[in-house]
Amino acid sequence: MKIRRKFSSWLVALGVDDASDELVREQFRVLSLQVPVLYAIVAFNSLFMAVAVIDVVPLELALICPAALVPIMVARIWVWKQRSKHADIVTAIPKIRRALLGNIAAANVLAGLLGLWSINVLWALPPERYAFIPLFTILSMITCAYCLVSLPAAAYSIVISGATMICIAMAMTGDAMLMGMAANIAIVSVFVMYMVSKQYQQLRRIVKSRSKIIEQRAYANELAHHDQLTGLPNRRALVERLIELQKNRPELPIAMAMVDMNGFKPVNDTYGHAAGDTLLITVGQRLKKMLGKDGLVARLGGDEFAILFEEPQDVDWVLRRAQQALVSIARPLMLGEHELRVSAGIGVAAKSKMPSDPLELLQHSDIALYEAKANNRSAISIYEGGMEARVKRRISIEKALSDRSQMATITLHYQPIIGLRPERLAAFEALARWDHPELGSVAPSEFVEAAERNGLATRLTIHLFRQAVETAKTWDDDTHLSFNLSGSGLGTSNLDKLLPEILNELEFDPHRLAVEVTETALLSDPAAARKVLASLQKKGVRIVLDDFGAGYASIGYLREMAFDGIKLDGSLIQDIDSNSRSRDLLSGVLQLCQAIGADVTAEMVEREEQFEILRTLPVKNVQGYLLGGPVTADKTLEPEADKAEKRKGLLGVFF
């Protein structure tokens, strides 16, 4: 077995076709440096030997070999020099293999011719000049073997063919000294071939180790530039591509779409991370298929992808492709028996030429994505100049909200709700106000939306609710508190437990509390919202549908949920004093509210004429700037007589 393995290793060493491409390249590189040296040394030795024996052998015998071979060797030196200069051959493995095989053939021819010449010179020399031949043979053999160590087949050919012929010829002379030299040359030849074999094996190991290092670097580079889950380019690869495009084609149009999925977390939480991974892989493949050869799709992390349009036709073309991306993402994915559906928001940045800072494209598409997610979770938004300031403000608001100490600076003002039969102060509606030292006056729509986007809605609600109840405790027992609940707080939190806990802690009667909810709040998760509101209602809290008439499905909610009160949207009140059709519409809406047995509150009452009409209709409460605007908590404690006088001063004597 050992002999067979040894024989196989010798065959590998001899056969160029058995070597790997990396080894063949290294053989060629080494030979391109050493073969010209080999030919130069052999040519010099041949000329030196010819000069040394020219006085004792026939002239034609002394010069025939140098005259024939030296020009050929000079030509071979030139050929190898040319090969080393042409870089294209280094990458053409078939060319390299042919060059190496040609070198083996040339080595055999050279060794044979030099051997025959040396034998003929030996036989023509007088005994006292024999020493020249062994000296020439040993020097040429060792030199050739050293120079051809990277190509053992050629080295073995020279050693075996050259040394064998000269050793036989020296032994045939019968001269004891030459016979001893022949034996010495034979032994040295064996050791030379052994050393060539060892050196070649070392070369193979070096090349193999270097190949492994190159493979590991390539793998590391692959990991550094690609997402391991989806196989798509990652953020680093995307940035490098942008830099490359900026360098090579800075004047051409460029566009990018940033994609953020909606509904990915619920899939992960409900069906597990394996399902989430499958979803991400599928979305990545769909985006790649949609884009085709028009650019690059990268996964930036989490459920966020980027689409780089390298040759966009125009803005409309980019928007059409972004719409195609939305459609492809929205297609259902079957996972076993489950059908998964997700949507996405997309932010687009389109430029007439590459920005001087390529990262600006990333930044602007990210800003546009933020705008898209803020306006509609499944929308496409294209970057425009004023967008950056709006996004920066939103981010600043979100950052401030995440700090409990800054959230604590959000306070409440209270707007009176006046009962008509009899005339009295029925309740105060708590309205959030935020005057930030750096951001200035922040509208409720701004910070409530920011809280909902960042999962802070429940914390904000609890902060404001506790503040409202603490203030309401200071009012008369027949003055109620009206408190607004936002959309996300209803569907995702346990407010039906948290709010009653605060009421119990502060010893506030639940029957004095009315919770106002809008149709938008109910739309986010109708089933969960109904559950929370029904639980609060059972504990004595009144549930009021706010902004009735502003939406398109409010009548359906009236049928499905038992509301204690209805607050009419201001649009129904706006022109009832000047438009008979508006008055007729309002009368119809009030009849509907009477049919379900819900008390009605009219808001945004701002003119005396509106007020006079509402007094004649089945409206229980009114609210608006005509009757009083929002005031601070301390102003709600003014004596009722003073407040009544102020109202009379505004309205005249209505009651």
Image (cartoon, rainbow, N blue to C red):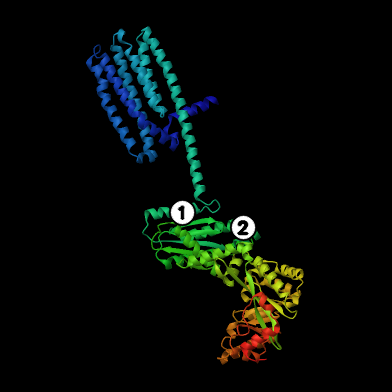
Residue type marked 1: Val
Residue 367 x/y as whole percent? 50, 63
Q: Quadrant of residue 572?
A: bottom right
At mark 1, the secondary structure is helix
Residue nearest the viewer, comparing 53 with 267: 267
Whether residue 292 is visible, yes or no, is: no
Residue drawn at the location 54% of the way across and 62% of the way down? 260
Q: Earlier in the sequence, mark 1 or mark 2?
A: 1
Relative to 173, 613 lies left or right = right
Q: Classify mark 1: residues with Cα within 10 Å, few (<14), some (14-19) or many (20+).
A: some
Question: Looking at the image, is 617 positioned above or below residue 458?
Answer: below
Question: For the residues carrying marks 1 and 2, which lies nearer the camera in this image?
Answer: 1
Residue nearest the viewer, comparing 494 with 209: 494
Residue type marked 2: Ala
Residue 291 x/y as whole percent? 46, 60
Residue 190 x/y as whole percent? 44, 19
Residue nearest the viewer, comparing 504 with 359: 504
Which residue is under mark 1? 239
Whether residue 409 is visible, yes or no, is: yes
Residues at marks 1 and 2 touching, judged by CB atoms closer than 8 Å: no
Q: What distance separates the C-alpha of mark 1 from that of mark 2?
A: 29 Å
Q: Classify mark 2: residues with Cα within 10 Å, few (<14), some (14-19) or many (20+).
A: some
Residue drawn at the location 58% of the way across and 59% of the way down? 279
The quarter in which the N terminus is drawn is top right
Residue 355 x/y as whole percent? 41, 59
Residue drawn at the location 35% of the way across and 20% of the way down? 140
At mark 2, the secondary structure is helix
Which residue is under mark 2? 275
